[in-house]
Image: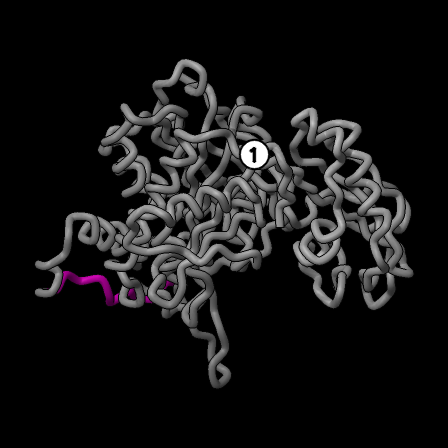
Amino acid sequence: MINMMKFFLIPVVLCMAITTSFAQFKGGEASYSDLNDSETVASFKKHVSYLASASMEGRAAGSEGEKAAADYLYEVMKSYGIDMLSNVDGDLFGIKKDNGDTLTSRNVVGFIGGYDKQLKNSYIVIGARMDNLGVGSITVDGEQQRRTYYGANGNASGMAMLMELSRMLSTNSLMLRRSVLLVGFGASDSLCAGAWYFLNRSFPDVANIDAMINLDMLGTGDSGFYAYTSSNADMNDIATAIGQSLQPIMPQVTSQEPYSSDHRAFYDKQIPSVFFTSGKYPEHNTEKDTPSILNYEYMEKELEYIYSYAMALINGSKPIFNPSEPVRTKTRSKGDVYSYYDCDQKPAFLGSTDPATFLEKWVYHYLKYPNEAVKKGIQGRVLVDFIIDESGAVTEAKILRSVDPLLDDEALRIVNASPKWRAGRVRGQKVKTQMTITVEFKLTKKGSFGIKK
């Protein structure tokens, strides 16, 4: 059994006001129509009704409500036959607030072991954030009124999905080649602190995490169901393959991040990740985010698809971290070089700030697969780092991850030959911007070559 660390202090500032009085939640009662619910829908309603109830007080990070939600998640997953790596109190960590106090939060971590001798020590992480905004106060006509942010969709829906997915995986555990980690992340809504703690202090075998699935805000799928993969080719290929089988629903694979969530922490560790969500909704971060707004029947369809995707990850080839958007890296010098993500206005190629446009309209359009590489059967993904200077010119291109000198040289050639971009800006001023892209060389079965587009 993997040992999890007990407590660690995370030196970050919590930007959240917490008050102590709570409104009453009046939704979530059973009705006659519930008699027709499937077992899964009934479970969804039970989970969400409890997690988004008034007794949870909005599940603010470090609150008794968040702890109660963690206790509930622990007990449900344990009842579903999941081995729990964290103890009954969760995997504790601390967050130092700006007033000097320490906020204590926790992760809940479950485990299903894989059967394959070669793959059982590799992991797929499936996670959902546990916390929401808690309570706050607003001024109406000069009077202070307290509000409870129940968070039924954000993110009791994702936690409910995590629990029912854990049940399905536990039932079919003999079919799992890789091992699975099922994680409820604490202090996630404004900080992603639980995910950071899990990856940097708690879980001892991060290098063997092959991929991550993030579940956040999945209750309004009838208005949209999305899969965000950071344009990772391998993760997109799984979605394409699943689409060829009979599914009750298919997500829209999007290159635009619907919402910043825990997948970001894994992405920054260069772990391929997919974020399943129904996206933002009118009641987001308001007191109207109650169980009544969720479409539970649609959630059941989402669950079937996400289960299929999870099984493909658990039993398939290891996905390679190969985003078409730039890797979020630190500034590589103490000078005026900014990362792509630090720019107020990101660099643009042919009017588009989406790096996929650069790949499609320039790189893959003019790239020439070296004949010698074709003869030798050399293929793979080359990671190229470069800077766009204040004039928009591409400079200082270099290889971060090599495949072969033949492919490396061609990738550098095409990047260096790039037309000018529109420079990135910070506080209105043009700046040098660091970017990283993946250039993929792929041979066809017939021995010719194809360049990914």
Q: Of helix, strand and loop, which mostly describes the magenta segment? A: loop
Residue at image location 67% in from the left, 28% down from the top: 378
At x 50%, y 77%, the residue is 139
Residue 270 visible? The answer is no
Amino acid on which the number 1 mark rests in the picture: Lys
- How many dots with numbers? 1
Residue in the foreground of this view, choosing between 400 and 39: 400
Q: Residue 442: x and y, percent?
A: 62, 37
Query: Can you tell which quarter of the image residue 356 is in?
Result: bottom right
Q: Which residues fall within the magenta stretch?
A: 22-31
Residue under label 1, please give it. Answer: 446
Left or right: 393 as drawn, with respect to 179? right
What residue sits 27% from the left and 31% below the top? 170
Q: Is 342 placed left or right of 277 in the picture?
A: right
Seen as rendered, the residue at the extreme bottom is: 141
Q: Badge 1 local density, few (<14 within 10 Å), some, or many (20+)?
A: few
Image quadrant assignment for residue 281: bottom left
Above or below residue 154? Residue 289 is below
> Is 137 in front, or is 91?
91
Q: Is residue 367 above or below residue 153?
A: above
Location of residue 103 in the rendering, given as x and y in whole percent from the top left corner: 53, 43
